[in-house]
Image: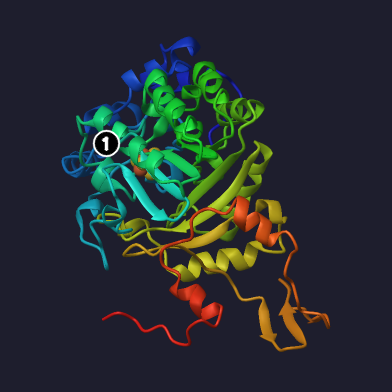
Amino acid sequence: MIDMSDPKYFQRIKAYEDVSPEQWNDPRWQLANAVTDAEGLSKVIALTPKEKADVDRAVKHSKFQVTPYFLSLIDEKNPECPIRMQCVPRLAELEPGLGDLTDPLAEDADMPVPRLVHRYPDRVLFLVSEVCSMYCRFCTRRRHVLSRTTKQLASEHDNAIEYIAKNREIRDVILSGGDALMLPVATLEGIIKRIRAIPHVEIIRVASRFPCVMPMGVTDEVIAMLKKYQPVYFMTHFSHPYEVTPQAKAACEKIADAGMPISNQSVLLRKINSDPAVMKKLLHELLKIRVKPYYIYQCDLAEGIEHFRTSVSKGFEIMEYLRGHTSGLALPTFVIDAPGGGGKIPVMPNYLLTLTDERAVVRNYRGLMSSYTNPRERDSACSTADDIAKNFAPEQPKNTAFYDLVDGKRVILKPQV
Ligand code: SF4
């Protein structure tokens, strides 16, 4: 782990020895000096001729950019440094993987208009940007983010907002990308202001990796803007405990102090956080900076990222290690984002051993088994349910086949082949 106790710690790196703290802490300086090719990278970290040639080859196929800040977290003594592995391209990116899919989550099929994924009934993912301050080598949206930049941004934003306004079941809008905070503050505000004016939108979420990869980008200006449009939730993405630095802490405190709850989504990455102790440390470090662990994603089947994937059993093992061994507050949900577009499916160890009409037999994290006795009365209908359904319930989901099974309205659901 890099010692960052000295605020000028980055001057230890030869390439940054003349950089002032004012420059370092200016996001414009960070972006202007971001490393975008093998030559630039070799000036900051030592690369062997082969590594340099490999980076050179790999970046011909996808965007490459790393902020000086994120590079400064690399431990050069560790060839498998988790920071380095996330940002330095490897030749493995060019190799086909088992089960690779161009659009692993089939998001294109759920895009009623460009930039808007409407998969779940009451929420949409609005890809407001396709640029990032750093391009994570494991990015699941590589086909959008690492391969292209469109010029239709404004008109596509307009169409997406119009769709949200027309569809009354949408109560939650996630502004993502790319990185939502890469938009100029005025552009982002223009989008948020229009979404906030739509009466049926209750929640706005802003997704950005800035707190982790360029924390100085969480400026007072953007925070003051977001604060005007509450309730706003902030979604971020830390992968490893060594990313939780004093700068990351300061950025997250700014967001939390402005009244925006922060949640974290990590991807399970081989040799980066694929270890129970590393993951637990990350979750604890996040809670200390007021970030709630939300999801751990099984790494998707996107092209060129098999070298980051673990088996599903590794995530399962990590969850078994976490539950009970740490507080519920620290526990994220481990999910597989179903290939082909099924959405997030939670995967967890089984704690329910059996269920009879009278009782449930459960086990705890240490293997202790207990019996829970069901009550005599089973009628659980709430007196306010009809009132809530009449006055507040959103439109019913269009595909209710599964619920028909649950409610006994049908006895079989056959796959469509
Ligand atoms: S910040 Fe998100 S969208 Fe951007 S490259 Fe990383 S994972 Fe992909």
Whole-percent x and y of residue 75?
A: 46, 38
The structure residue drawn at horizontal position 38% and vertical position 16%, both measured from the top left corner, is 28
Number of numbered callouts drawn = 1
The residue wearing badge 1 is 64
- Say if disc 1 is inside 8 Å of ligand 1: no
Q: Quadrant of residue 337?
A: bottom left
State whether residue 82 is above or below residue 384: above
Q: Quadrant of the C terminus?
A: bottom left
State whether residue 252 is above or below residue 274: above
**Quadrant for ligand 1?**
top left
* Type of amino acid under label 1: Phe
| Most foreground residue, 212 or 417 | 417
| Most foreground residue, 76 or 223 | 223
Whole-percent x and y of residue 311?
A: 42, 68
Residue 303 visible to an observer of this rendering = yes
Q: Secondary structure at mark 1?
A: loop
State whether residue 203 is above or below residue 402: above
The structure residue drawn at horizontal position 22% and vertical position 29%, both measured from the top left corner, is 39
